[in-house]
Amino acid sequence: MTTSPHSTSIDLARRLGTNAHVCEVVQNTSLSTSLREIVLQGSAVDLCGVPGNDVMIRMGDDSGSFTRRRYSVRSVDPERDQFTLWICTTHDGLGSQWAQSAAPGDAVDVVGPRGKIPLDPNADWHLFMGDVTGFSAFYRMAQSIEAPGRATFIVEIDHDDDTPSAQFSEGVAVSAVFVNRSGRSRTDPSGLLSGLGAFAFPGGEGHAYLFGEFSLINVLAAALLDRGLSDEQINRKAYWRVGRRNAQNGEPEKDQS
Ligand SMILES: Cc1cc2nc3c(=O)[nH]c(=O)nc-3n(C[C@H](O)[C@H](O)[C@H](O)COP(=O)(O)OP(=O)(O)OC[C@H]3O[C@@H](n4cnc5c(N)ncnc54)[C@H](O)[C@@H]3O)c2cc1C
């Protein structure tokens, strides 16, 4: 297996002040109708940072050109030197194709850790909202909440089985509302907004993390501001955008044209 990352990965990591390594795919399994779970081996601690961080994967297409896609780290196993990603494959895109075809033994260039949204250690309760692409970050972050914390997930799913389970620390109160999209448009916020409407804010300081489709997370942020959260209590990150390919840097374009 190749052991040295591509020179562009090394340059990118240097520019970003992070790391570049070659990892090996060790497992690729179906987690649900929408999600695949991919386990990578190598430099796990060096690449994966803290809960909320992601890694950049370099992937090629049939024409021989390359791009990068960002995926939140679901979990890290330092003893085995492995880490896990959960990747949505319901659409047709380079990342989706890579996630469906990655096979044990494949070498992959990984740059990480990336990301600037860690868990707020001072919050009494944490609200995780978005779509299935957010599950990986949501669960890793929620698993780092200490008792007597509180985690609530309000996530829009496409299929009834898109509800992966996880173990959380004893003494952490966990609740989840999974809203089936039921054929609504992917930019229709009504499902998530009704889930939010049914959520009574617990006492104490809260923090919301919004990860998912570009326009939806902006609508959700506005709804949370209306409910009384401040800007500082809301972190949002657009993971993808309806009708657009993510750019070379792995992020959705922000312009409105
Ligand atoms: C910081 C960060 C962390 C991320 N973490 C994760 C993660 O943990 N898991 C994960 O699955 N993704 C995650 N993403 C999104 C991921 O990086 C890719 O954008 C996504 O996988 C789409 O890439 P693609 O090459 O498959 O499709 P693209 O080439 O970007 O898009 C092709 C087409 O598919 C549509 N499309 C893209 N994604 C979806 C989707 N989820 N549902 C429906 N249509 C879609 C686009 O609108 C476009 O029309 C993250 C993004 C960022 C910025």
Image: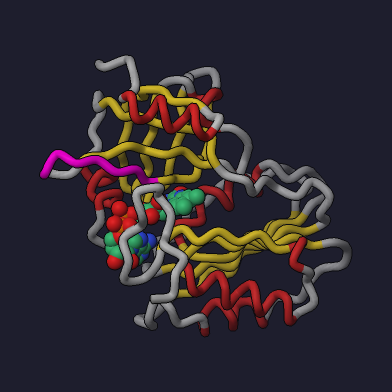
Residue 33 in view (yes/no): no
Q: How many marks?
A: 0
Of all residues, the one furthest to the right in this rendering is 204
64 drawn magenta: yes
Image location of residue 45, percent across then percent down:
55, 24
* Segment colored magenta: 63-69
In the rendered image, residue 189 lying in the magenta stretch gets the answer no
Question: Does 242 appear above or below 77?
Answer: below
Which quadrant of the frame does ligand 1 lie within?
bottom left
Residue 18 visible within the image: yes
Left/right of residue 68 with respect to residue 150 in the rendered view: left
104 in relation to 115, above or below: above
Does residue 182 lie above or below 24 as drawn?
Answer: below
- Image location (x, y in percent) of residue 237: 55, 58
Residue name at image x 76 percent, y 56 percent: 150
Picture coordinates of residue 171 (x, y %)?
78, 47
Q: Residue at x 32, y 32 (%)?
A: 27
- The image position of residue 145, as x and y in percent, is 73, 45
Residue occupying image coordinates x 80% and y 77%: 228
Q: Quadrant of the N terminus?
A: top left
Q: Nearer the viewer, residue 151 or 207?
A: 207
Left or right for 143, reference 87? right
Up-down: is 161 above or below 26? below
Quarter of the figure that contains the C terminus: bottom left
